[in-house]
Amino acid sequence: MPHNHEELLKHVSSEMPADELLQDLGDLFKVFGDTTRIKIMYALHEDEMCVCAIADLLNMTQSAISHQLKVLKAANLVASRREGKTIYYRLADEHVKSIIAQGYEHITE
Amino acid sequence: MPHNHEELLKHVSSEMPADELLQDLGDLFKVFGDTTRIKIMYALHEDEMCVCAIADLLNMTQSAISHQLKVLKAANLVASRREGKTIYYRLADEHVKSIIAQGYEHITE
DNA sequence: TGAACATATGAGCAATCGTTCATATGTTAA
DNA sequence: TTAACATATGAACGATTGCTCATATGTTCA
């Protein structure tokens, strides 16, 4: 008979957050899991930037950047304001920086 | 003529980490970007577990869990030890917990 | 109003990802 | 050695993802 871990499972199971929360966590990190989006967030680290400046910086099309900004905004990682024709994006809050900082620490240990 | 941001770009550009590091950062977060892997890491939060216990807990096949553990191990997020036929996995270090904690904070703000 | 600019968006396509299934490897005990 | 167990692995398939291209929306200025 395969080995038994009923007791362990009962305990760990009771400590697990709800499935929906775990799903949301995964979805959040999925947003961080793309180099383009990481670059965008790094670019916004110090100051806001408009879409075309980000596109220039990363040497990518305006469309590609715009699509990614939409993803970042849906995850509440960036916010934007309009000034005439231009739309400026900035990091939404400090979580972005601390999450990236933790990741940075891990890979550079 | 489209608007100019040469000065800004020069500055932001000089502050950007190397491409390879940004790639590694994205790759790291990609590993966190899956609910199954998040669940595994949460399960290992307190104590080590063997593969079949994790599979039981998450109600998934041994194979699926094994594949995901391989991904987690490649990213240095979990470590393992053998005891007879059984292989026990545990979190590799505290970074895992702090990264997840930061993400948790963001979604529950 | 119309032209130029800045950004957003939808469809489509190649690439990547997570699972399943079958099977291989490694360990223990009889 | 053989059977049973625990885990790992490779191929394959459907689903998701990130980009491109064409075009739409929104704003300013003449």
Image (cartoon, coloured by chain):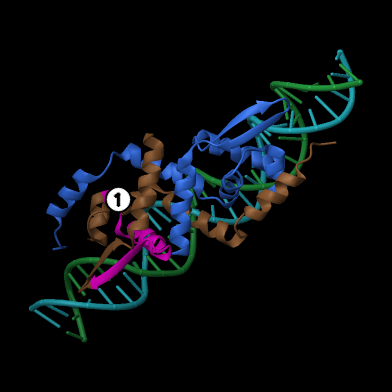
Chain colours: A blue, B brown, C cyan, D green
Crowd rating for badge 1 (residues with CA inside 10 Å; few <14, some 14–19, many 20+): many
The answer to whether A86 is drawn above or below residue A18 in the figure is: above
Q: Viewer-proximal residue, B58 or C30?
A: B58
- Please identify the quadrant where the N terminus of chain B is shown: top right
Q: Residue at x 67, y 31 (%)?
A: A87
Does residue B5 appear in this view?
yes
Name which residue type carries label 1: Tyr
Quarter holding residue B44:
bottom left
Q: What is the span of residues highlighted in magenta in the rendered image?
A: B58-82
Q: Residue at position x 52%, y 34% from top?
A: A74
Q: Who is closer to the viewer here, B69 or B1?
A: B1
Image: D30 above or below A29 = above
Is B60 included in the stretch rendered in magenta? Answer: yes
Chain letter, disc 1 residue: B
Is residue A59 visible in this depiction of the protein? no
Q: How many marks?
A: 1
Relative to A109, D5 lies left or right: left
Q: Is residue B19 left or right of residue B45?
A: right
Measured along the vertical axis of the image, is residue A107 above or below residue A97? Answer: below
Decide: is B95 above or below B86: above
Residue at image location 41% in from the left, 49% down from the top: B34
The x, y position of residue A44, in whole percent, is: 60, 43
Residue A17 figure quarter: top left
At numbered mark 1, what does the secondary structure look like: helix, strand or loop? helix
**Does the magenta segment cover residue B14?**
no
